[in-house]
Image (cartoon, rainbow, N blue to C red):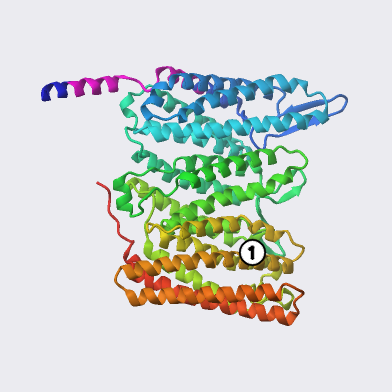
Amino acid sequence: MAQLSSLKSIIDSSDESGRKVGRLAGFGSIFGIVAAAFGLLIGKTLIPIAGIEWEFTNNPSFQWTLGGDSQFHIFVGIFMGLMAVSFLFQAVGSKDLSGTLSSGYLKILWVGFISAAAVAFYLLTQFPGVYAAQLIPDFITPMFSLGVFFVIVWQLGAVIYTDSSKTWVGFLAGMCNALFIPILALGQAINPILIYGAYGILLLGQLMSLLFWWSPMDTIREYARSTKKAKFAFGLSGFLTALFGFAAVMFGPIGIEQGVEVWFPWSTLVNEMTYLTNPALIFGLLSFMLYWVMLAPRLGARELKAAAIGEDIIKGGIKWFIAFLACFGILAAGQAGTGLEGVGVWGFFMVVAPAGILFLFGASYIAKTDMVTGLPLVVTSVFLMVHPFVLLPLILVPWILIILTQIFLMLETWWRGLTGFSQASLTVIVSLATSISIIFFMLGVFGSGPLALWPTNRWFNITLIPGIPAAVQGPAIIILPLLAILIRNVSLAGYSYGRGYSSGGVLMGISVLFAFMIPVIAGNQSVTHEANTGAALLLALYSISVVLIMALNLNLANDVEDEGHGFEGTLIRMATLAGLVAASAVLILMVIVFAGMPTPEQIALMVSIMVTFVVSTEVLSSLGWLISGIRLGMLKVGFKFSRLE
């Protein structure tokens, strides 16, 4: 029987190695190769993405051109038609792969066929019907919308190769196909030479796709967890995302304000039809962010144990919310680059989408005790949302740190097969450091601002940096206390990680919600109004956070007691209950005082009471976090490196 079983396994393995992933699907890649060669020949952006120019004349009769060429719509129709045929063959020929993976994700190929065919059909049939200037907007808007839909599907389809294959062929197929759109967008915004580079990368990607489909079926992963090369692709895509973002940071939004270099957010308009930063740069960044998040690794038990994180870092609702933000951001950037009047309405989403993605990635890493990767992402995301401008170093330095930490993470995914650094000790240190900074801000340790900011001048010293006008450094200074609370909150989520508390996850979710509200601070008439709005957000976030923090502290007290440290556990519990009583008293006082029209003296009294409450709460909580970090062994976790065998 043993010999028969061995013979059967040999036959099965030989059948598996002889069976191709998708013979018919490979012919689709041949059409993709032809499309890439056609793109190289034409040398223009043949997908309707942000930044494609159009113009018209009425002298002597109406004429208009799209993409700088009267035949542009025909070129796009040919290119997208070839891509549609490519998707069709791949969709039909991918049934075996879909069955092997036990996944319906490959149905995205059918959507790709429909979207590519729709773009080709629309350009070829509707362009000739534009015979007057007033008809151009009705043609342009749907064209860019269809282009956005195709780009989203294209990026989602590129994930198939990287995620399913165990070989470098699948790795290169997915990576090159995913890089095509961002580099094409860079070429549209920076240098047309990059457009040729984009088609060259597409050509390589389609060649690798052909090899992928005609490879033996045993090159496909057997298990649901991500392969080593897929994890490395995640690390590499994070690094490349940082580079694409750096291009969007450097090209366009840097300017001078009262003699000081500042960075203008991506929503800044030059006029009602033009953005200061080319939307194509944001378009390319968001398209690759979509690929990045969809590669979020699924780790096996061995990796989870070695990483000491217990579960995947980016997964479930957070993963799909990030993907939604990326898709909506791509739509916003696509419409912002149409060159039509009224495109300013999309500016808010061009800022919130990429910044929100960075914040969610960073908060997720920090919540899993990976400060090294997460902290630069959170800090950068907050400053990206500051309006109407922010000091240039506050954008450049954190972004450079993102690039460096993503390099470390990329090396980590390759050498040890892990996708994060579990550093619980840094969770304790950062939580304490940010709590101390909150105390300093509330006590006015960093100095006081002008009396015009009263009653918030003690918190927002907008003359903190010598030699820089208050109006220039003001937006950044106003956001610093809020940034401290946001970092403190997501850091505290690391305490609850692996312990079954729900308060840590809710604390992170509340922080994400308030982070998205940062741009509203700019919707004021002066620095004084900005300071008042910033203070309102600050106190609102703190008020909600303090309730969740107290719940977290009570849970930590129970765990410390369970570890055999009854005195410390009781101390944490009593301090938390005292804070709860104080919070109730402050709330009642605020309701009584602000029920009518409070006098300046009453407002000053309430501000003093709130400052006293915040400082005392932070001191007692910090003591509890330090005790918990020591007694629960968190200060001993981290800085241990071992390679998976």
In this rendered view, identify the residue nearer to me: 127 or 141.
141
Task: Tell me what residue is drawn at x 51 percent, y 28 percent.
Answer: 108
Expressed as whole percent of the image width and height from the top left, the position of residue 44 reads 62, 29
| Crowd band around label 1 with a 10 angstrom C-alpha radius: few (<14), some (14–19), many (20+) | many
Q: Quadrant of residue 609?
A: bottom right
Expressed as whole percent of the image width and height from the top left, the position of residue 197 reads 53, 34
Q: Quadrant of residue 438?
A: bottom right
Q: Is residue 635 left or right of residue 278?
A: left
Q: State which quarter of the image contains the N terminus.
A: top left
Q: Main secondary structure of the magenta part?
A: helix
Task: Tell me what residue is drawn at x 45 percent, y 60 percent.
Answer: 493
Q: Is residue 533 above or below residue 309?
A: below
In this rendered view, identify the residue nearer to me: 254 or 504.
504
Give the extent of the magenta segment: 8-32
Task: Tell me what residue is drawn at x 78 percent, y 24 percent.
Answer: 130
Numbered marks: total: 1
**Residue 22 located within the stretch drawn in magenta:** yes
Is residue 201 visible in the rendered image? The answer is no
In this rendered view, identify the residue nearer to me: 301 or 610.
610
Residue on which disc 1 sits: 537
Expressed as whole percent of the image width and height from the top left, the position of residue 503 reads 47, 60
**Residue 209 located within the stretch drawn in magenta:** no
Give the residue type at disc 1: Leu
Expressed as whole percent of the image width and height from the top left, the position of residue 200 reads 51, 30
